[in-house]
Amino acid sequence: MEGKELVLDMIHRTGVIGIFRVDRPENCVLAMDALVKGGLNVFEVTTTTPRATELISEARKRYGSGALVGIGTVLDRETAERGIDAGAQFVVSPSLHKDVIDVCKNRGVVSCPGTFTATEVVQAWNWGADLIKVFPISQVGPGYITSLLGPLPWMRLVPTGGVDSGNARAYISAGAYALGVGGALVSKKAIAEGRYESLTEAAANILAEVRSAREQV
């Protein structure tokens, strides 16, 4: 395997994308270190985080091949290009943008556009998306993933929004390719209070749920 296939395989094997939407960029790498200690090594730095592209570049140098780093909340071609130039290995959007998918295809980078309906899921696939984010999944729950995969079993779905260790097992059992996890994993409150050990614990807990669900399949 090489390129996108390696990235897709690592995302699937890890099973969780840790989403960083933090207020103070200087704490971001400390939070990443904490997740790595818990076994999680796939990070999405959102563009709403100050100095996001700098953080992506720094993280790529810090972790090398030991972690994947992507850019999130990407709404246009220019932002996708800047993220990829900084070293982003995957690009995530909350919504569906053909120009962003096209940039990822042209640059050989994994795309993960946001969708909600079956029509959007199929459109994303037809445009060449590699992963398909289903957001906000909290409004419908794990059964929605099962329903989508019924007629569309080849889709690599990444439910995001309200996913935590309490429901991770259900989403994986429903057929999710991986999970997008933000606040339940990268807690702004814990970071502000310097309780990075709680992030390590949260990472270990949700990864254990993912492994357990897959072992039962």
Image: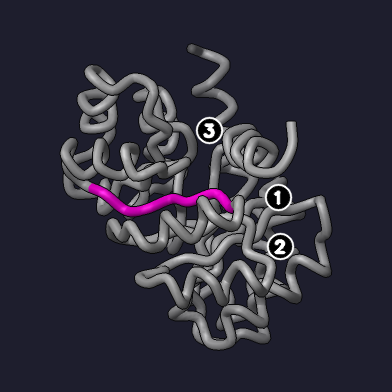
Front one among 133 and 28: 133
Residue at left 59%, top 57%?
Answer: 107
Residue at left 74%, top 31%?
Answer: 1
Compared with residue 30, is residue 40 higher up or lower down, i.e. above or below?
above
- Which mark, residue 38? 1
Compared with residue 85, is residue 175 higher up or lower down, i.e. above or below?
above
Please, what is the three-letter code of the amino acid marked with disc 3? Answer: Glu
> In terms of secondary structure, what is the magenta stretch mainly?
strand
Label 2, residues with CA under 10 Å away: few <14, some 14-19, many ≥20: many
* CB under 8 Å between discs 3 and 1: no
User: Residue 30 lies in what quarter of the image?
Assistant: bottom right
Q: Position of residue 195 (x, y in %)?
A: 64, 72
Q: CA distance from mark 3 to mark 1?
A: 13 Å
Residue at left 18%, top 36%?
Answer: 118
Please, what is the three-letter code of the amino acid marked with disc 2? Answer: Ala
SS at circle 3: helix
Ranked by sequence position, the earlier of labels 2 and 3 is 2
Using residue 12 as the reference point, say whether residue 59 is left or right of it. Answer: right
Please, what is the three-letter code of the amino acid marked with disc 1? Answer: Gly
- State the residue position of label 2: 34
Ranked by sequence position, the earlier of labels 3 and 1 is 1
- Magenta region: which residues? 109-115
Q: CA distance from mark 1 to mark 2?
A: 7 Å
Label 3, residues with CA under 10 Å away: few <14, some 14-19, many ≥20: many
